[in-house]
Amino acid sequence: MARRDYEDDPSAPAANSLVPAASAVVVGEDGRVLLQRRTDNGMWALPGGRMELGESLADCAIRETYEETGIVVEVTGIVGTYTNPGHVFAYDDGEVSQEFSICLLARPTGGSLRTSDESFEVRWFAPQETDGLAMVPSIRKRLDDWRAGHGPAIR
């Protein structure tokens, strides 16, 4: 399903849903971070997605990371909360969801890199290598917050 991100854009459609979601900054022992290149917008992103009924937020991040990248993770902390009402995701089925995402910190415990129907490239990057990557502003904020290391961000 195609998705378009709008952040603080006056031409954005009005939200008609609020969906809890989790993303993960997965950091390997060597300090590199795991990113995927999304099939829906071609941008680099953290693994993550919608929380399902019956799962915890940590379980959501673990499941989404495995589904999208093939890497099994353990959640170790929180990067921040991201709930900007001016950030919406418009889907081709007419849903427009307001951002409600918690970004967690995780470490890999197994698995191997692979793509999925949501990702056409998955790679590990040194933090400074992420600077020039094409990504939506909300993902850039999460990476910047993690790199700044000032504790959980509330946005």
Image (cartoon, rainbow, N blue to C red):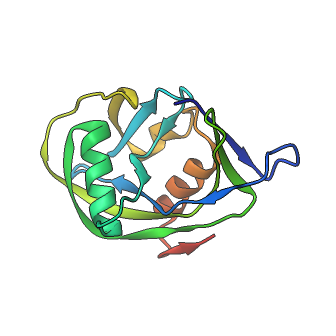
- Residue 123's spot in the image, x, y percent? 33, 32
Judged left or right of residue 136, residue 54 is left
Residue located at (28% from left, 37% from top): 69
Answer yes or no: is residue 88 visible.
yes
Closest to the observer, 84 or 32 = 84
Residue located at (26% from left, 65% from top): 75
Residue sitting farthest toward the right: 10
Does residue 30 lie above or below 119 as drawn?
below
- Residue 76's spot in the image, x, y percent? 27, 69
Judged left or right of residue 100, residue 68 is left
Judged left or right of residue 62, residue 47 is right
Closest to the observer, 8 or 107 = 8
Name which quarter of the figure residue 18 lies in. bottom right
Figure quadrant of the C terminus: bottom right
Residue located at (29% from left, 27% from top): 115
Closest to the observer, 103 or 53 = 53
- Residue 2's spot in the image, x, y percent? 57, 29
Picture mark count? 0
Does residue 15 lie above or below 1 as drawn?
below
Name which quarter of the figure residue 23 lies in. bottom left
Residue sitting farthest toward the left: 110
- Residue 116's spot in the image, x, y percent? 31, 29
Residue located at (32% from left, 38% from top): 68
Answer yes or no: is residue 31 visible.
no
Judged left or right of residue 3, residue 107 is left
